[in-house]
Amino acid sequence: MIQTRNLIDENGRRTDGRTADELREIKINVGVVKNADGSAFIEFGKNKIVAAVYGPREVHPKHMALPDRCVLRCRYHMSPFSTDTRKNPAPSRREIEISKVMREALEPALILEDYPRAAIDVFVEVLQADGGSRCAGITAASIALADAGINMRDIVASCAAGKVDEKIVLDINDTEDKEGGADMPVAYMPHLEQITLLQLDGILSYEQFNECIDKAIRGCEIVYEIQRQVLMQKYFGNETELKEEQ
Amino acid sequence: MSSSKRSTIIVEHLRKQQMWDAISKGKRLDGRNLDDIRPLEIELDIIKKANGSAKVKLGNSEVIAGVKIETGEPFEGLENKGALIVSAEVLPTASPYIEPGPPDEETVELARVVDRGIRESEMIDLDKLVLVPGKIVYTIFVDCSIINADGNLFDATSYAVVSALASSKIPVFEMQDGKVVHTGNSQDPPVTTIPVSITAIRIGEAVILDPTSEEEACMNARITVTTNSNGDYTAIQKGSTGAFTVEQIKKAAETARIKGEEVRAKLKESTRDG
C-alpha cells in the first residue's frame, strides 16, 4: 500500500469530509424491479446497486434441489461501466468469491427449511462502485429478500470499518480502501447479535482489531435502522409514523 | 453463481451424535482436545525444478507448494513492486468428490484467502524485487497442489506457501543491452515476517481448531485468521453458512495469536534461514 497523502486532516475530517464515525449517505428504495418477487435499490455513498430476488421457485437443474431445505443462489456482478477502467463483464475470481461470501452472509438469516426442494435467487448488480460494494450489496439484498416475503429470522445489515492513517474509522470509501491501512467488511444480524460476514485485509494490532469490529457493528446497527425505516415506510406508510409519534 | 449445496461427505447420524457427545466433553473423535492442531510435517525442496518448494502434511491433508520466479511487467498501480501470485488447485487425487475441471467457488475462495494472508502480511518485501522501475520486476508464482484433502486446506496450503517461499532461492537477473539476463547466481528472498493462518470452526456452541473434513461436514461456521510475527492481524475470512457471536469471533482471533505463535516457531525451525 502506498501512503501518498494524509487521508485524515488536522480537524479529523476524511477525504470526503466525514468524521471517523460517520457513514456515507444511504438511500434505499424498495420494490424497484417490477418483475422480481422482491427488490431494492441502494445508494451508499457513490455506490449504486440494484438487488433483485426471485423465488421461492422451482430449481433448475432439478438435481440441485435439496430435500430438506431451499437452495439459495447468489450472484454478485459488476457492470462493465461501474468502475474507472472498463470491467470485463465475465465473472472475475473476485466476483466468484464475493458471490460466495454474500450467500453465506445472507443464509443464516433465512429460514430455508420452510421451502424444501425450491430455490431462491438473489441477484446483486453493482451499477456504480465506490468501495464497500459488498456491504452495500448485502444490505440491499437483505431488504429485497424481506420485500419478497421470504421467512427470515433477522435482517442482515452490513458495513465496513478499517484503518486510515493509524486511526480506526467507519465505512471505508474507495480512496481509503486503496490507500489506507486495513479494510474489514462486516455483516451483522442486530437482533440475534451474530456476525454473518467478516473479512479483513490489511494489518491491525490486537487492540485495533477489537476496536474495528466493535465500530463496524455500531455501523451495522445504524444501517439496520435505515433498513427498518425503509421497510416500515413501504409496507405501513404513514401508519407507522403516527404510531411512533404516540 | 454461488449456490448452497449439500455437504459432499455424508456423516452418518450416529457418527454425528458421537462427535457432538465427544465435543460436549471437550474431546474430538480423533482424541484431540478442542484447540489441538494435528501433527504438522514439513518437507522442503522436494521439487528440484522449482526455485523453492515444500510438502506440508497437516494430519492427512497434504499440500505441495512450488515457487517459480521469472521477470515480467509489474501490476497496474504497483509499478515499483515485484509481483507475487499465489494460486491453488485441489487435484482430483485429493478426494473421491473432486472432479477435474475449472475451479469451483470453494477452490477460488481457498486460493484467494491464502493469497490474501501472504500478500497483506507483506511477508516478502516486494520493493526489493524491481529490475527496471515501472517496467520490469520479479514475478513470483506460488502454485499449490492439494494432493489429499482431509479438512483445513486453508491452513495446510498457507503453511506450504510460507515454507516454500521462505526457503526459496531467487535467481539474480540483470539488465544487459536492454535484455534480462540470468547471472547464474541466486539470493535469499527478502522475508520480513512469517504469516500464520489459523482456522477454527463452530459446531453447535463449541469452537474447535484445525478441523478434519468429517468435522467440516458438520460445521455451522468457519473462520480463518492470519497473524504476522508481531501478533498483528493481517487477514480474516469468515466462511460457511452459519454465524458467529462477537465473543466467539474475538475468542477465535485471540486463539489465532497464541496458536499462531506455536506454528510460527515450527515453520521457522523447518525453513533453514528462519
Image: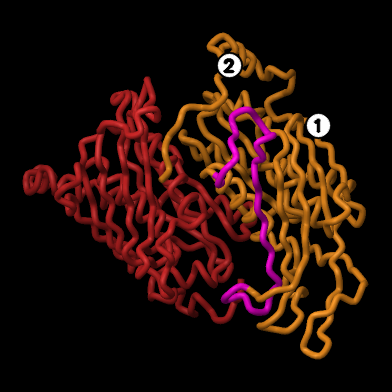
Q: Residue furthest front?
A: B100
Q: Are marks 2 and 1 on the same chain?
A: yes
Q: Give the x, y percent position of residue A87.
A: 42, 67
Q: Which mark is residue B20?
A: 2
**Which lettered chain is shown in orange?**
B
Q: Please, what is the dominant secondary structure of the magenta stretch? A: loop
- For the magenta stretch, what is the residue range? B75-103
Q: Are marks 2 and 1 in contact (CB under 8 Å)?
A: no
Horizontal arrangement in the rendering, residue B200 relative to residue A154 (left or right): right
- Name which residue lies at 83% across and 76% down: B173
Element under disc 1:
loop
Horizontal arrangement in the rendering, residue B54 relative to residue A126 (left or right): right
Q: Nearer the viewer, residue B72 or B99?
A: B99
Please state the chain letter of the residue tagged with numbered disc 1 in the rendered image.
B
Q: Three-letter amino acid code at disc 2? A: Trp
Q: CA distance from mark 2 to mark 1?
A: 23 Å
Q: Three-letter amino acid code at disc 1? A: Pro
Mark 2 burial class by Cα count in 10 Å: few <14, some 14-19, many 20+: some
Which of marks 1 and 2 precedes in the sequence? 2
Q: Chain A rendered in what hue? A: red
The answer to whether residue A246 of the structure is visible from this angle is no
Q: Quadrant of residue A105?
A: top left
Query: Is B109 rendered above or below residue B119?
Result: above
- Name which residue lies at 38% across and 71% down: A18
Mark 1 burial class by Cα count in 10 Å: few <14, some 14-19, many 20+: few
> Is residue B82 highlighted in magenta?
yes
The answer to whether residue A10 of the structure is visible from this angle is yes
Q: Which mark is residue B39?
A: 1
> Is residue A208 highlighted in magenta?
no
- Name which residue lies at 49% across and 80% down: A10
Q: Give the x, y percent position of residue A11.
A: 45, 78
